[in-house]
Amino acid sequence: QVQLVESGGGLVQPGGSLRLSCAASGSIFGLNTMGWYRQAPGKERELVAGITSGGTTNYAESVKGRFTISRDDAINTVYLQMNSLKPEDTAVYYCNVKVFSYVYWGQGTQVTVSS
């Protein structure tokens, strides 16, 4: 089993920043891709950003240039630095990791961008 603990969500004003963290523990030998998804009310869950074990990253077009994903393999943690936040970034953000061919999800953390 793999456990994912997310932190860092909250309420921020437009233009502000937040950093999300997701720490993986348990049976994580074979951990490879790590990423973040989000789901806004009434919408489908969508990929925000991903990072492979080799450090290759990919981003949704809507967050390119504003969000940065990174990982620290020494502590099995993935981060999402979110800058220049917009109201449309409001959603529940979910951590996602792949261990061999298995996919695991975090419990989600709420990000609300509002004045």
Image: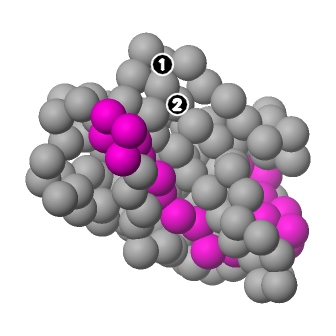
Quadrant position of residue 50: top right
Q: Is residue 58 above or below residue 61?
A: above
Q: Which residues are magenta?
A: 83-102
Q: Position of residue 20 (x, y in %)?
A: 48, 57
Residue placed at 52% from the left, 44% from the top?
A: 35
Nearer the observer, 52 or 21: 52
Quadrant housing residue 110: bottom right
Relative image position of residue 25 (x, y in whole percent): 17, 52
Q: Which residue, given by chain and number where applicable, does mark 2 sit on?
A: 51
Direction front: furthest residue: 101
Q: Is residue 80 above or below residue 75?
A: below
Position in image of residue 102 (x %, y %): 36, 47
Amino acid type, mark 1: Gly
At horizontal 78% and vertical 52% (from top left) the residue drawn is: 84
- Residue beneath the point at 68% across and 30% down: 58
Quadrant housing the C terminus: bottom right
Asked if residue 27 shows in the view, the reply is yes
The reply to whether dot 1 and dot 2 touch (C-beta < 8 Å) is yes
Name of the residue lying farthest toward the top: 54
Instruction: Find residue 54 and report its horizontal and vertical position in percent.
Output: 43, 15
- Which kind of residue does numbered mark 2 sit on? Ile
Q: How many marks?
A: 2
Residue at 78%, 65% in the rendered image: 89
Secondary element under disc 1, as helix, strand or loop, is loop
Q: Which residue is mark 1?
A: 55
* Res. 14 visible in picture: no
Quarter the N terminus occupies: bottom left
Determine if the magenta segment contains residue 89: yes
